[in-house]
Amino acid sequence: MFLMENGIDVDSIVPDNELEEEIIADIKAGRSKEVITRCPPEPSGYWYIGHAKAWTINFETAQKFGGKTVLRMDDSNPMKEEGEFAESYMADLEWLGFKPEKFVYASEEYFDEIYKIAEKMIQNGDAYVCELSAEEVSANRGTLTEPGKESPYRNRTPEENLKLFREMRDGKYPDGSKTLRAKIDMAHPNINMRDPVMYKISRQHHYRVGDKWCIWPQYDFVHPMEDCLEGTTYSLCDKGFQDHRVVYEWFVEHGWGRKYAPKQREFSRVVLENVLTGKRYLKQLVKGGYVNGWDDPRFPTLVGIRRRGYTAKAVKDFVKSVGWGSTIEVTVPYSALEYYVREDLNKIATRAMVVLDPLKVLITNYEGSEEVLIDNNPNDENAGNHKATFGNCIYIEREDFSDNPPPKYNRLVEGGIVRLKGAYIIKCNKVIYAENGDIDHLECEYIPNTKSGNDTSGIKCKGTIHFVSADNCFEITVREFKNLVKAEYKTPSKALADGTPIEELLEPNSMVEKKALAENFLKNAKVEDKFQFMRKGYYCVDKDSTKDNLIFNSTISLKDGFKPQK
C-alpha cells in the first residue's frame, strides 16, 4: 500500500491513460505530493464542445487522485476579452458538475509577480528588449529548414534591457515599438524556441484592471508562470500546444527556477464532423446575425446545446468515450455525441403526448370523457404517471392515417383498427374529405372492453399510436432544427480556411417554427425541462417561452443507427 498525504492508496488506482500512469509513477518517486490541475480559459468567447473534454480531463484527473482544480481567467489579451465571457464559464462548469478549488483572474492575481519574474530574467541575461517590428521579427524567424536571424538588439547588457523594459512599463514608448523577448536560440529546430516574445506594448483598456498596464505578457511566457505561481502540478492541454511544450519547460526552468515545476501534457482534440467550432468563427456568426446569440440551440457552444436540451452527463460521457488520445485530432461523426444524449434522455425524460401535425378524429359512439394513465418514464420505476383524457373528439398525427397504405403499415386505415396509447382500440369507419381533396377528419368508433390495462376483448391489434383529446390539449410552439452547416462540409473550418464564404456553409432554414397540440399535462413545464414526445423525439422547454406560448426545442430523434465501439 502506497498512501498519499490525503490518505488515498495509490496502488488501488487503476490508470485509464498514459497521464495517470505517469502521475502514479511521479507520486511513488516523491516528485508529486498532490495533483493540482487548472482550467485556464481566455475570456474571449463562449465554451464549445471541445472545451468540455479539456475540463472533464482536468477536473476528473484531479478528483481521481484526491486533488483539486483551479479556474483561472487567462486574461492577458484585452483586445479580445469581455466580462460576459468570463461570467459564462462559471455557469458552464456548474452545469457540467465541476466545482473549482478557487477562481482567480490572472490579471489581478499574478501580473505583478509575473512582471518581477521578467525583470529577474533580464538581470540573468535570459531576456532582452527588441525594437524590431512584428513583421521584422516574423521575417527573421527562419523556416523549418533554415535558422533564424538574431536581432541586432539581442546583445544589450542586462542593465540596458532593464532600463528599457521599465520605460516600456511606464508608457514611454508607442504601441508596437518594442517587445521583450526571451533569449533562447535562433537556430533551434523548433521555431517556437527562436526568441519568443514575452511582452508587447499595447494601450488597451482591460475589463478587470483598467489602464494599469500598457505592456501585456504573451501566452508562451505568461501561461507557465501562472501555472508555477498557482502550484499546478500537471498542465493539461490539447495537442495543438505540443510544439510549445519545450518553450513551456524553458520558461519554467529560467523564469521559475525552483525545484518544484509543473509538467505540461497534451491530449487529443475532438473534432466533430459537419460542425463549425473555434471562437473566431462562432463570433463571426454571432456578429453577422446568422444565429440568435451565443446560446442559439443550433450552436455547438455549451450554452447552445444546453438550451437545445442536451445534458451535462451526455456531454461528459461522450468526451470520455473519445479517450485521452495520442493523435492531434480525433474526428468523430456528430451522431456519436447524439448517441450519448439519446441514452441519457431515454432514462430521465418525462413522456408526454404531443401531436405535431394534427388530424381530427370524431368518436361517433362515445359521449363525454374519461381519464387514462400515462407512464412518465417506463425506465424509472419512481417516475410515476400522469392523467390524460380520452373523449369523443381527439387528434392524431396525420401520418398515422393512410388512405393508400404501404406494405406492413400498422397504423390507421379506413376499415382498420389501431390502439390509442393508454386508451381504447378504435376503428376507422369513414374518411371525410375537404373541398380541396385533403382529408378533413375521420369518423371512428371505439371498441368497448379494450381499454389499456383492462382489455378483455381478445382483439389483437398490431399498431399503437399517441393522441390528444380536444378537451385536454393546448397549442404550443415547436422549433425543429437542421444542422447549421450543410452536410457536404464535413470539415467546415477547412472550407473557411480555403476561402469558402461563411454564408455558403450555412444550411438555409435551419430553424423552423410550427404549432402543435400538447396534452394539458405540459402546461406546468419549466425552462430546460426535458420530455420525450412519444414516438416523435426529445424536446426541451426554451427560455423564450411565455405564459401564453410555451416553446419546445427539438433536441434529438428517438433512434439512430450509430453504435459506439466497445
Image (cartoon, rainbow, N blue to C red):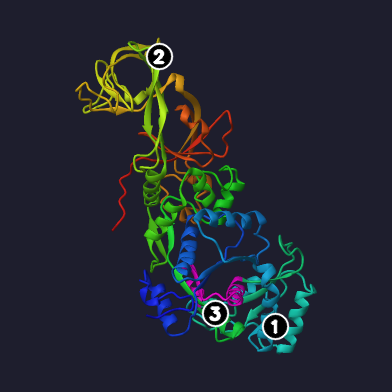
Identify which residue, 38 or 364, lies in the foreground. 364
On screen, residue 379 versus residue 86, left or right, reads: left
Vertical comparison of 299 with 177: above or below? above
Identify which residue, 45 or 353, lies in the foreground. 353
Residue 76 position by quadrant:
bottom right
**CB within 8 Å, label 2 to label 1:** no
On screen, residue 565 versus residue 136, left or right, reads: left
Which residue is at a point 42% across and 83% down the rendered structure image? 28
Q: How far apart are the two marked residues, 2 and 3, measured between alpha carbons?
A: 82 Å
- Quarter of the image for the C terminus: give it: bottom left
Residue identifier under label 1: 119
Tag on residue 368? Answer: 2
Under mark 2, the amino acid is Gly
Label 1 residue SS:
helix
On screen, residue 39 versus residue 117, left or right, reads: left
Residue 241 falls inside the magenta stretch: yes
Under mark 3, the amino acid is Met
Tag on residue 193? Answer: 3
Residue 322 position by quadrant:
bottom left
Residue 110 position by quadrant:
bottom right
Q: Horizontal and vertical percent for residue 167?
A: 78, 78
The dominant secondary structure in magenta is helix
Q: Horizontal and vertical percent for residue 75?
A: 64, 65
Label 3 residue SS:
helix
- Magenta segment, which residues? 219-245
**Residue 509 in sight in this render:** no
